[in-house]
Amino acid sequence: MRVGILGGGQLGRMIALAGYPLGLRFRCLEPSREAPMGHLSALVLGHYDDPVALDRFAEGLDVITYEFENVPVQSARRLARHTPVYPPPDALEIAQDRLAEKRCFQELGIDTAPFARVDSRDDLEAAIDDVGLPAILKTRRFGYDGKGQAVIRDAGDVVAAWNALGGNHLVLEGFVAFRRELSVLAARGRPGEVVCYPLVQNEHRGGILRLSRAPAPDLAPGEQAEAERIVHAVLDRLEYVGLLAIELFELVGLDGRIRLLANEMAPRVHNSGHWTIEGARTSQFENHLRAVVGWPLGPTTPHGCSAMVNLIGRAPAEAAVLAIPGAYLHLYGKAPRPGRKVGHITVCAPDHAQLEALLARVRPLVADRDDPSAGPSLTA
Ligand code: AMP
């Protein structure tokens, strides 16, 4: 079977690496000749909105998917006229717009931060009255890794936030005093069956994911079930096929009860699921492929505990990482650049204590390799 992937970054590369053992073949559409996918699959060089490139890309493919969610929805719909495209373009459209996404959560009874639409300076004043401060002003579209966001702590920050982002379609979100950030990843197959991975705990710095631990330690009773309820509801509502990630804020109420708020969804494989390559019985990449191709989904049971450390900016020496037993190195074939995800390291161990011991050996290798403006490296 021939699978087309819109986007040629590291996510597409890891999808292809999961698919080759299953006999799948890949072609990607990608505007850059240097893309990580270029090293291992046929690549059609072209822009996502170029009809000639789209037609050349789609020729003879059995199914098309994305590794990049900012593909124009019209392009996805055009391709879907002749070839199945999963996740469905309607899901892509909702996930591309933070406002539509939050409304979708709301309709399904899933809690979010308070939010309000902002298209003008007057809207912003009204939104602040509505949502309260502190708050975060975000662009509705094309934000990633914390880009397109401005924190408004008090009235003195409003002008700067508006100067930075005004003119875009925006959403104001109340600032959530979360205890930690979690993500839930699940796949839904073509017939509608769903498999869900254990909750992942994520640490961000400078808006970029640095470290994921899975399964998330110290979950409250019922917390995994609540996350599964959330992701299942969204998957079914969107008639989704493929892997979906939802980023969650974990809150502790005054009564000590844990609450999960949905922050955003990614209609694709997700950075917080890279640990599943070595750490789960079926990786997120393989389950995504199984779903879009129409095959049965694989078990998501974890092998003990895993942690994934992103390599940001540049990678450490391969030999230094590989000298740590239980550490797995993934390099994406990208040139070093501050703030860029160039690879990741996964460590796996039978329990959390041994995992932390391994992480302590990985940390010195990744410290100071990052963009110096992003502050200190991994927190303990
Ligand atoms: P996002 O692009 O929405 O995933 O935001 C990037 C990061 O900013 C998140 O992972 C959080 O660490 C932080 N963040 C985003 N929205 C909020 C919020 N409403 N309250 C507190 N922190 C937030």
Image: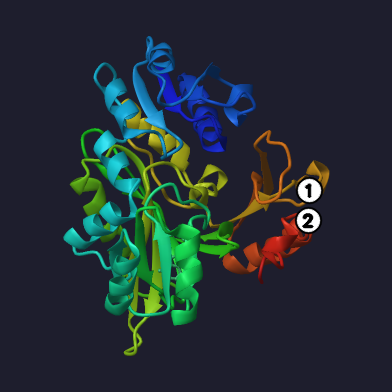
Specify the amino acid type for callout 2.
Leu
Given residues 165 and 213, the one toward you in this image is: 165
Q: Is residue 295 visible?
A: no
* Amino acid found under the numbered disc labelled 1: Pro
Which residue is at 42% across, 60% downward?
A: 138
Q: Earlier in the sequence, mark 1 or mark 2?
A: 1
Residue 296 placement: quadrant: top left
Residue 328 on image: x %, y % = 67, 45
For residue 292, the mark is none
Front residue of 64 and 113: 113
Q: Which residue is mark 1?
A: 316
Find numbered disc 2 in the image and state the secondary structure of the residue it sits on: helix
Give the answer, above or below, for where 54 lies relative to 150.
above
Q: Residue at x 49, y 80 (%)?
A: 156
**Badge 1 vs badge 2, beta-carbon distance below 8 Å:** yes
Using the rendered view, name the quadrant where residue 66 is placed.
top left
Residue 368 x/y as whole percent: 78, 59
| Coordinates of residue 126 in the picture (x, y in percent) | 28, 73
At x 38%, y 13%, the residue is: 55
Judge from the rendering whether residue 307 lies leftward or rightward of residue 315; answer left or right.
Answer: left
Vertical side of 341 occupied by 362: above or below? below
The tally of labels here is 2
Q: Which residue is mark 2?
A: 365
Q: Nearer the viewer, residue 11 or 257?
A: 11
